Image (tube, grey):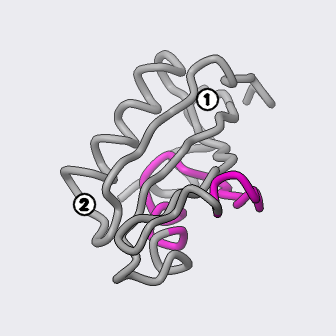
Amino acid sequence: MIKLSNILLESANLYSIDVLIKTSTDINKVDVYNQIRGLSLVVVVTVEQNDFLVGQATDKFEYSLLHIKYLVYDEPHADIDLIKKDALITTRIEGLLQFIPRYKTIKQKAKY
């Protein structure tokens, strides 16, 4: 587990990215969002209400667009890929079927 004191002592950058997720309708989406918020390196997760994505939902799948702020120690693409791997494989968030980062939306927010 990463401690706040360790984070403050290391050089880190805060980046944001948009991520499209696909979830199972069997699982509460709020639970999935909260578990993503709990992943290492993730700082803030904001859900964008999107009528188009709501219209794409089926009986088995739902889609959501998340704005994620995350800490970067190496490279923004590599660290979001670590978060993706954590969500889908390491931690294995139940009900999360796809985690699709929109790499073109990566923006640096702050430098520490």
Position of the C terminus by quadrant: top right
Q: Residue at x 77, y 61 (%)?
A: 49
Foreground residue among 36 and 2: 36
**Does the magenta segment cover residue 46?**
yes
Q: Residue at x 35, y 71 (%)?
A: 60
Crowdedness near tag 1: few (<14), some (14–19) or many (≥20) residues, C-alpha within 10 Å: some
SS for dot 2: loop
Amino acid at the residue labelled 2:
Thr
Q: Residue 4 is drawn in which quadrant? A: bottom right
Q: Residue at x 46, y 32 (%)?
A: 80
Q: Residue at x 63, y 60 (%)?
A: 55
Image coordinates of residue 24 in percent, x first then y, are 36, 70
Considering only vertical position in the picture, is 106 above or below 23? above
> Label 1 vs label 2: CA separation?
23 Å
Which residue position is annotated with label 2? 91
SS for dot 1: loop
Q: Is residue 74 left or right of residue 89?
A: right
**Given this view, does label 1 or label 2 mark the residue nearer the observer?**
2
Q: Is residue 94 left or right of residue 11?
A: left
Circle nearer the N terminus (1, 2): 1
Amino acid at the residue labelled 1:
Ala
Q: Residue 27 is drawn in which quadrant? A: bottom left
Image coordinates of residue 13 in percent, x first then y, are 66, 27
Q: Is residue 68 left or right of residue 51?
A: left
In this rendering, the count of numbered labels is 2
* Magenta segment boundaries in residue numbering: 33-54
Image coordinates of residue 6 in percent, x first then y, are 50, 46
Foreground residue among 59 and 81: 59
Position of the N terminus by quadrant: bottom left
Which residue position is annotated with label 1? 12
